[in-house]
Image (cartoon, helix red, strand yellow):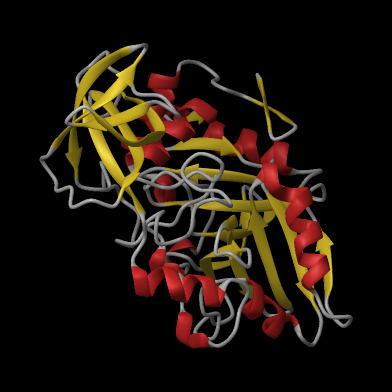
Amino acid sequence: MVDFGGWEMPQQYSSIRDEHIAVRRVAGLFDVSHMGRFRIAGNSSFQFLQHIVTNDLKPLAEGQAQYNLLCNDSGGIVDDLVVYRGSEGFFVVVNASNRESDLRWFREHAPPDVEVEDRTFELGLIAFQGPRAQELLPCEGLDAIPYFGFGHGDVAGIHALISRTGYTGEDGFELFISSERVGEAWDAILGHGKSAGVLPAGLGARDATRLEAALRLWGNDMDETVNPYEAGLGWTVKLDKGDFVGRDALQRVKAAGPRRKLIGLKTEPGNIARHGAVVKAQGKPIGVITSGTHSFFLGYPIALAMVEAASFRVGDRVDVDVRGREAPAEIVKLPFYRGSARSAVSPARS
């Protein structure tokens, strides 16, 4: 167990390797109740959210979810989040480490007729991820839920709001369940899938799988000093939707081009580049590692790096600092791994 954003979280239940492989080959069950959950209600809810997020909410129909960013006036990323549009309004899921600051941000920007309610402690949130997740989740009607859609159902007889979203690159579901009953649902899912190889999975497997899918982690790969174009998330910025927080700054960045960019690196087994390690090209520092781990599934270490926006190409070589020595690394195409998720565009969450 480790501290994560003020929550006591499992780093692993058995072994990170076994949990990682289970997610890739069968399915793994994650407790993600640390993520912040806000309900947004009021007549101006749509206009309010449209003004503080970068993506365009107009195409979002009831029963759909959308990956989004909060940016400050300078275009830096305050947080990444998912916006859900339901029949009774909106709700959003934000990062655990930013829950309190995001709640203040929402309430400071909200007009008088909009209520921002923190539902984090009333609703548990578990994620069931893997290529066999639909087959092994004890719930009917899952075919009706599209990628980045959601609906209601009974999981082993327990009511849940079920979204087809996740943070591993695989198909799967995130289940919003009353905190009083989420433990029952957890036990039922594990019991139902045990014979097939379903395992509970901790933060170690979560980080490895999200990195293989090149899903960004706020606080590592992006923060308020990084803009969406540098993070490779420019597709979430809709400058033509009208005014929103950070729009003017982001318009200038897009016109001039970003100064930095996020790239993928592959190193030899044993050479794991960690967050903050220096990246060099021809002996000159050009950036730093933002995330790095050993991929048990791929069989070698992988990393994301924020580097100067030079014309690096897939196949080029750079050097990275690994415990005080320089190790060779190859620039590779992102994502490192493309799993069973139904969309080619994978969002980033933490």
Name, please, the residue furthest toward the front.
284
* In front of the other: 341 or 184: 341
Tell me if residue 150 can be seen.
yes
Q: Does 132 appear above or below 202?
A: below
* In front of the other: 129 or 255: 255
Residue drawn where x is 22% and y is 16% of the image: 269
Residue drawn where x is 69% and y is 47% of the image: 98
Measuring from the top left, give residue 204's x and y in whole percent.
49, 26
* In front of the other: 29 or 141: 29
Please tell me in which quadrant of the rendered image residue 283 appears: top left
Going by the image, does 226 lie left or right of 44? left
Residue drawn where x is 59% and y is 59% of the image: 81
Measuring from the top left, give residue 40's x and y in whole percent.
76, 71
* In front of the other: 158 or 298: 298
Going by the image, does 274 lie left or right of 58? left
Residue drawn where x is 30% and y is 23% of the image: 296
Please tell me in which quadrant of the rendered image residue 319 appears: top left
Q: Does 254 appear above or below 124?
A: below
Going by the image, does 329 lie left or right of 341? left
Please identify the quadrant where the C terminus is shown.
top right
Please identify the quadrant where the N terminus is shown.
top right
Tell me if residue 193 can be seen.
no
Q: Does 107 appear above or below 217?
A: below
